[in-house]
Each structure stands twice: as C-alpha cells, then as structure tokens.
C-alpha cells in the first residue's frame, strides 16, 4: 500500500537514485533484490526512512513475517515518530501474533504527532496523517477535504494523494469515484502496478473487460504482483475456470507461500468441488499467520455468495464479524447476504447499524434509503408467496401477479419434484434504480428485468422499462423457475444451466414467450461464436456486447433443449439432483447422457447448427447498396443479382407499399414470411402484411396475420392494440378479452387493455372481471371519469355491494352533476327508486 508513498518521500539528491533503483526493483517484483539492497543501505548507516520501509514491505510480500517484524523493531528504534512505519507495522504485528500491541503502538504515535506536528506537514506526512485518522474512525469526508484534497491543491502531481483518495472511495464501495480519482493522477502513476490494480478494483463490478485489462497491465509491469494475481484468480473463479484459477494461485504461492487470500480462494475451490476436508485445511492455512484475520472468512463468504451459496456464505461472514466486529466489508456483505436469503429482520437491522456507524458507505446508504421506500409498498400474500409492489401498481395488476406466480409455482414444482421451503419473497420495483439497489446494492444494472437469489426475487415493473416493456408474466415465470431449480440443487448450479432452464421453461409455458432465432444469433451459431456446452457459464461472465449476453441466454436454452432430447426430462432432473448432492456438472453430464464431454460438445454444436441452418434456409443477409429513396424497380433490378437477400426483399416490400402497389407488396411479404416465419424484428412481414391488409380493407386477413404474430411474440403491444380494435368492431368479445389479457401481460399501466377488458367482460357477463377492469381504469384514465365511475357503480350494485356502489355513483355525480342515469342509479341504491336494477340506457353510455 505504501510503495507510492515511499517512492515520493523527499531524500537527499545523492541517495535518491539508489532509492529509485530500489523502488524499481520492488515495482517489477524483484522483492528479494530490493530487500538485499535495503539491508545493505541500512547496514551502511543510511538513515533515510525509505530503506526500512522498502525492506519491510519486500519481506511481507514474500511471507517472511518474522524477519519483517525484526526489521520493523529496528527501524522503529531509529525512527520512533515515523507514521509510515506505524501504518506498515499494523500488518506486520498482526501477522506475527502481536495484534494486542496495536493499542500501545497507536498511543505512542499519537503522542509523537501531538508533540511534533510540524514533522508531518509535508505532503507525505499529510497523506499518512489522513490514513492514520481513518484508522481512528475520523470522518472520511473531513479526511478527504483536509488531508488528501488539501495536498493536491498544493501539489497536483503528488501521486500518493490520488492513491489514498481512491483507496478511500473503494473502501466505501464508491467504485465510480475511485476510477474518476485515479484517472486524474499524473501519467507517472501508471508506472506502478498498484495503480492498475486499484483501477481494476474500480472496474471489477461493472466492467469486467476493463478490469481484466488493468490486471494484465499490472502483471506486465510486475508478473509477481500478488494483489493483481489474486484479482485474476478471483475472476477465473467467477468464470468457473477453476483449474486456471488454481494455477494462478500457485503463482501467488511461489511469491508468498503463506498468503492468506490465496489459501482462502483455495478453500472456495475446495467447497465448490464438495471437498469439505480440503476446504477446512485451506482455511486453516489461511488463518495460520494471523488467526484473527477477518479478511479470510470475508473473502470465502463473498465468493460463496457470488456463487449463490448464501447460507454457507452467511456462516463464513458471521465468523468474520465475530473475529473483528468492526470489519466493515464482512458486515456489509453479511447484510446483503441475509437480505438475499430472505432473512429480512436481521439483514435490515444490520444494514441500519452499519449505516449509523458509517454514513459514507454507498451500499448501506442506498439500502437504507430503499428500506424507507419499501415500507410504503403494498404486500400481497398467498400460498407461501409474499409479493411487494408499489401501492398504485398493486391496485392495477397485483392480483394478476399473485395468480401468475401461484400457477408457476404449482406447475414447475410438480414438474421438477420440488417443495419450496418457507416463504418466497417477490419485490417488483417501478424504478430501475430501486431494483438495482435491492439486487446489487448500487444503481445501474441495465439490461436486467429480474433476478432470483433462491428465496428472494426482484423484478423491474413495466413502469421502469420505458415505452416498450417486456412481458412481465414471462419475466416472473422465468424467475420463479430459478427458485425451483436453485432449491432442487441447493443453489449448486452453474449460471448457464440455471438461465437455460428458465428460458426453456418460458417457451414450454407459452410459445409466444420463446426467444426467436434472429439473424444475429443465426450468424453467431454458423460462425465461430458458439460456446461449447461444457463451458457455457463463461459466456455470461465476459460477453463482448449486450448482444453476446443475449446470445448466451439463447444458447443456454438451446443447450437445455438438447439435453432434454438426449436424456429426457428425467435426465435433466437427475442432473439437478446430482448437483444438489455436490457433484460437478461435468461429472453429472456424462453419467446422465451416457456420452463423453467431448461427444456432448460435438453433438450440441451439430444440433445448434441444424437449428440455424433450418431457419431462413437459402436466405442471405448482405446489405443493400442502393441510395436512399430508390423506387421498387431499382430494388427489383438489384435483386436479380442478389435473389436470396432478405434485406433486399424486405426493402422491395416497403418500396412497393410506399408506391401503394398493394398486391405486389403482399406477394413479396407472404413469400418472405413463409421463408423466415421466426423473424420478429423491425419491419417484420407480419406487421407489414397487416398494414397492407388494412389499406385494402381486408379485416379478416389483417386479423389472421396479427394472430400469427401474437402467437410468436409476447411483447407485440401494437399487434394486441389493433386486434382489440378489430375484435370489438366485429363483436368478437371473447377475442377482445383475450387480446386485452395479452396486452395486460405486457403493460398493465396504460388504459387501453383495462378499457377493452371492461367492455368485453360486461358483454360476456363476467361481472367480477368487469369490476376489476373499471376500477383499474378509474385509476388510469381521466378522459370520462363520470362514465367510468357510473359503470363501476352499476356493476357493484348488481353484485350487492351497495356501499361501494353508492360511493362510486357519488364520484360520478361529482364529475357530472347533471348525469341523469347516475341520479337514477343513486336513487335506486339508497332505496328511493322504483326497485330492481336500473335499465341500461340507450344512449350508449353502457354496453
């Protein structure tokens, strides 16, 4: 940590070159040579503090803890007021079983600071003072303002002030601020591997590719940089590249055989291969240098939580907090883990305690802000399901959410032979930021519609998704499927299999929920971008783009479909059972499919290629190199030399439509739809054909083609809206109700589907559905509130719910005091009317 500070320490000119040489040795990882050079200088009487600091740091890097302690003692005797030595000495004492001496050492250094404050007036001293004050629990904002920023105002090129500021931001989990701070550092900062390591930490959560590049930059400068090697191993564990991770850990051990974090990661690897004895042995080795080291169990707990082993993670994190109740990383991770386990009372309590102790921690600040917001949510409960929603959204579609989840739970639990233990919490957020904070602790997380931790599901509501939301029913079905499979495997399943089953089950429940094989996916399969089935998790962890991530979901579902064909549903269930018993997927796959991994990968690749080759067979995807505004004749001429071009045929259809050549356009579109019925992208043949049929007043043909689209695309809101219009015009109220239901599954926050459902339900004598729809419309639509409240009042009166009916008719009269039919209804409801339900007026107010 102090290398940059050491390098910046002011020294006489005659010695500076030697110190610079030593710093270069340290930075490139030649710790032994650096320690020898420092020892020689100290022996020759050089009293510059940089030498003992370099020696101690080199010895600590190589695990020579007892030698580092002797060097610390000698250096402290020569320079008892050195704050740099004190800060470094904390780690040295702990790794030599002398943590109990920390209070005495701190008191001594405090006395020196109070007696000789001018000694620490240099930039080096002020940054060291800042670090010291943070250890004492000083306000981080004051340290930043009065120490680090104050130094940078005087000396903008002082590297260690940037490093210290970034470390403080990372400690508070403000990764964006850390990266911003480091970017402002002078160019010379990039010569130190630690700079790149800190930048990698700042990128680790949101930019894996950027983090990997920074790690490689650090290791290029110093192949033995332990912090960077450990971060690389950490990422390999995330990618399920366990053998590669173990090799990197071996490289760490070659530098420092006692490195606790390396042993902690070995404990994680042992846990993931169900090696309990190896796990405990590795943990014991990790704690050997310092038995009270909270970082060991925090690291193990964090990695297990990332693997969704939340119960086991909580056990380790509790150990860490017992070892050091003030260790904030363990406490924050434990709070998040408990909330993901559904242990809300303890999780929220702990988050509140952390926030009270450290108001600058970004994660707990966000969580406690969200806690206040969640207190205002509505809770719906049934069948062990606890649904929390914004009150307005709960009124609009809460019962539909609960009914959908109950159906999914019953269907999938029976299919996979699972009983969900205890309650399942589902929280649906109308604001993307709230979803991200509940799910990840920080804002951001674009691209996620829902996340399942096992006993907790979080989801974005349609309100958070802009003008074109995704089908929320499909999202919730997908996430509840995760709860089933995670329960069956005891959270021991690779991400690709978990996602693949959930996407696969969407299509099994409703073909319109199936992800279509689009041209991009087809090209990726037929190219060289198909990931082997046995390595599919890696596709989720470092995707090149958002499109590659979406392809990972698609390919995973395709892989599950392949496994079901190869081993049957019983085989798939058996794989999940094996995972729950602690077997790895690559152990289970050969046994359940009776194929080697090599054959599985080969057969799956062929299966995927067959799917791709069978889609849009014979079509090509070259761009149409014609100027804008060309007519259909020019496009037709171009097609003579490109007869199989999908884009060319698509352009020809749109040009013919622009020229109002409807029969010709329809012929092209019918052929295009037949060649590639799976295409649902912009200007798909279904919507273009519907437009042609509308122009030619062929309502039956328009309805038929839109029904085809609706059967394939559960997000096709424009098609549902038009189908509602067509069915209402034809008096097809069953169809209108079906269309309204489809649209409500996409966006229940707009008036159209509720209005359609209200009208259709009345015509079909489904009074309860009509009441619910009119109630929703009363919340959403103010174009004719008098009519809405009147219709609702009439239906409530017919249902015998007189008090509610009277309230609604009074609301109608508030909006339209001279509404005659409302007056008649009110008289009837209060008992002064002619008796019996009122007649439906011929004015058209009620249908």
Image (spheres, rainbow, N blue to C red):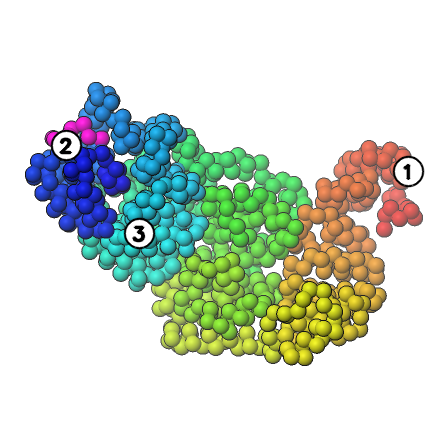
Q: CA distance from mark 2 to mark 3?
A: 31 Å
Q: Residue 54 versus residue 410: which sits nearer the camera?
A: 54
Q: Which segment is the magenta one?
A: 77-83
Residue 46 seen in the figure: yes
Q: Residue 638 versus residue 801: which sits nearer the camera?
A: 638
Q: Residue 508 versus residue 547: which sits nearer the camera?
A: 547
Mark nearest the camera among 3 and 1 is 3
Residue 772, image x, y percentages? 72, 47
Residue 591, image x, y percentages? 38, 73
Q: Earlier in the sequence, mark 3 or mark 1?
A: 3
Where is mark 2, residue-wise? 76
Q: Residues within 10 Å of mark 1 (few under 14, many from 20)?
A: few
Where is mark 1, residue-wise? 820
Where is mark 3, residue-wise? 218
Q: Residue at x 71, y 57 (%)?
A: 718
Q: CA distance from mark 2 to mark 1?
A: 96 Å
Q: Secondary structure at mark 3?
A: helix
Q: Is residue 145 left or right of residue 135?
A: right
Q: Secondary structure at mark 2?
A: helix
Residue 285 seen in the figure: no
Q: Residues within 10 Å of mark 2 (few under 14, many from 20)?
A: some
């Amino acid at each position: 940590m102090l290398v940059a500070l050491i390098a910046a320490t002011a020294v006489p000119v005659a010695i500076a070159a030697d110190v610079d040489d030593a710093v270069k040795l340290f930075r490139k990882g030649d710790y032994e040579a650096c320690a020898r050079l420092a020892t020689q200088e100290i022996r020759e009487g050089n009293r510059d503090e940089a030498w003992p600091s370099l020696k101690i740091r080199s010895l600590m890097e190589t695990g020579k803890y007892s030698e580092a302690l002797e060097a610390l003692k000698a250096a402290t005797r020569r320079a008892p007021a050195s704050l740099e030595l004190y800060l470094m000495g904390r780690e040295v004492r702990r790794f030599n079983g002398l943590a109990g001496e920390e209070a005495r050492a701190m008191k001594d250094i405090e006395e020196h600071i109070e007696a000789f404050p001018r000694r620490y007036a240099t930039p080096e001293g002020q940054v060291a003072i800042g670090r010291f004050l943070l250890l004492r629990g000083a306000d981080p904002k004051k340290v930043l303002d009065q120490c680090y920023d104050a130094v940078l105002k005087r000396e903008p090129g002082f590297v260690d002030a940037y490093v210290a500021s970034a470390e403080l931001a990372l400690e508070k989990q403000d990764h964006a601020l850390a990266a911003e701070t480091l970017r402002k550092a002078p160019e010379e900062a990039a010569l130190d591997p630690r700079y790149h390591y800190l930048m990698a930490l700042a990128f680790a959560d949101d930019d894996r590719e950027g983090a990997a590049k920074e790690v490689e930059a650090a290791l290029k400068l110093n192949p033995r940089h332990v912090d960077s090697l450990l971060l690389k191993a950490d990422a390999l564990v995330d990618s399920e590249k366990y053998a590669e991770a173990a090799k990197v850990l071996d490289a760490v051990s070659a530098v420092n055989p006692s490195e606790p974090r390396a042993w902690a990661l070995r404990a994680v690897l042992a846990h993931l291969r169900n090696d309990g004895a190896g796990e405990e042995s590795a943990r014991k080795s990790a704690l050997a240098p310092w038995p009270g080291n909270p970082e060991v169990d925090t690291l193990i707990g964090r990695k297990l939580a990332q693997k969704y082993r939340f119960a086991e993670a909580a056990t380790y994190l509790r150990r860490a907090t017992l070892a050091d109740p003030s260790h904030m990383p363990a406490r924050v991770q434990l709070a998040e883990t408990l909330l993901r386990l559904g242990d809300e009372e303890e999780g929220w309590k702990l988050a509140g305690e952390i926030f009270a102790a450290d108001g600058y921690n970004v994660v707990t600040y966000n969580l406690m802000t969200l806690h206040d917001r969640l207190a205002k949510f509505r809770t719906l409960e049934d069948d062990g399901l606890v649904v929390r929603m914004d009150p307005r959204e709960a009124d609009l579609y809460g019962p539909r959410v609960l009914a959908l989840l109950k159906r999914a739970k019953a269907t999938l639990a029976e299919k996979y032979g699972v009983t969900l233990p205890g309650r399942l919490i589902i929280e649906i957020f109308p604001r993307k930021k709230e979803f991200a904070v509940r799910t990840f602790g920080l804002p951001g997380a674009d691209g996620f519609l829902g996340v399942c931790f096992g006993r907790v599901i979080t989801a974005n509501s349609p309100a958070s998704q802009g003008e074109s939301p995704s089908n929320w029913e499909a999202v919730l079905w997908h996430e509840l499927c995760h709860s089933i499979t995670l329960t069956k495997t005891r959270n021991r399943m690779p991400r690709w299999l978990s996602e693949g089953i959930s996407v696969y089950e969407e299509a099994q429940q409703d073909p319109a929920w199936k992800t279509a094989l689009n041209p991009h996916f087809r090209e990726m399969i037929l190219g060289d971008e198909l990931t082997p089935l046995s390595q599919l998790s890696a596709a989720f962890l470092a995707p090149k783009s958002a499109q590659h991530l979406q392809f990972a979901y698609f390919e995973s579902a395709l892989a599950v479909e392949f496994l079901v064909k190869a081993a049957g549903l019983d085989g798939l269930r058996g794989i999940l059972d094996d995972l729950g018993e602690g077997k790895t997927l690559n152990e289970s796959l050969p046994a359940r499919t009776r194929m080697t991994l090599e054959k599985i990968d080969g057969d799956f690749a062929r299966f995927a290629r067959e799917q791709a080759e069978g889609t849009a067979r014979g079509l090509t995807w070259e761009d149409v190199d014609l100027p804008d505004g060309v007519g259909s004749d020019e496009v037709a001429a171009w097609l003579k030399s490109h007869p199989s071009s999908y884009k060319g045929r698509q352009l020809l259809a749109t040009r013919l439509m622009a020229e109002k050549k409807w029969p010709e356009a329809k012929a092209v579109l019918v052929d295009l739809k037949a060649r590639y019925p799976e295409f649902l992208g912009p200007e798909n043949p279904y919507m273009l054909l519907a437009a042609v049929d509308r122009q030619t007043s062929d309502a039956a043909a328009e309805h038929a083609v839109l029904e085809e689209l609706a059967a394939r695309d559960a997000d096709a809101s424009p098609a549902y809206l038009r189908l509602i219009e067509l069915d209402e015009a034809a008096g097809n109220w069953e169809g209108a109700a079906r269309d309204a239901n489809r649209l409500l599954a996409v966006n229940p926050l707009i008036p159209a589907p509720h209005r359609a459902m209200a009208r259709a339900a009345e015509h079909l004598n489904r009074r309860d559905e009509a009441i619910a729809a009119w109630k929703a419309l009363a919340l959403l639509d103010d174009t004719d509130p008098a009519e809405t409240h009147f219709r609702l009042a009439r239906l409530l009166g017919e249902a015998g719910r007189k008090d509610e009916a009277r309230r609604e008719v009074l609301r109608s009269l508030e909006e339209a005091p001279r509404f005659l039919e409302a007056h008649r209804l009110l008289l009837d409801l209060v008992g002064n009317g002619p008796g019996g339900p009122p007649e439906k007026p011929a004015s058209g107010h009620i249908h």
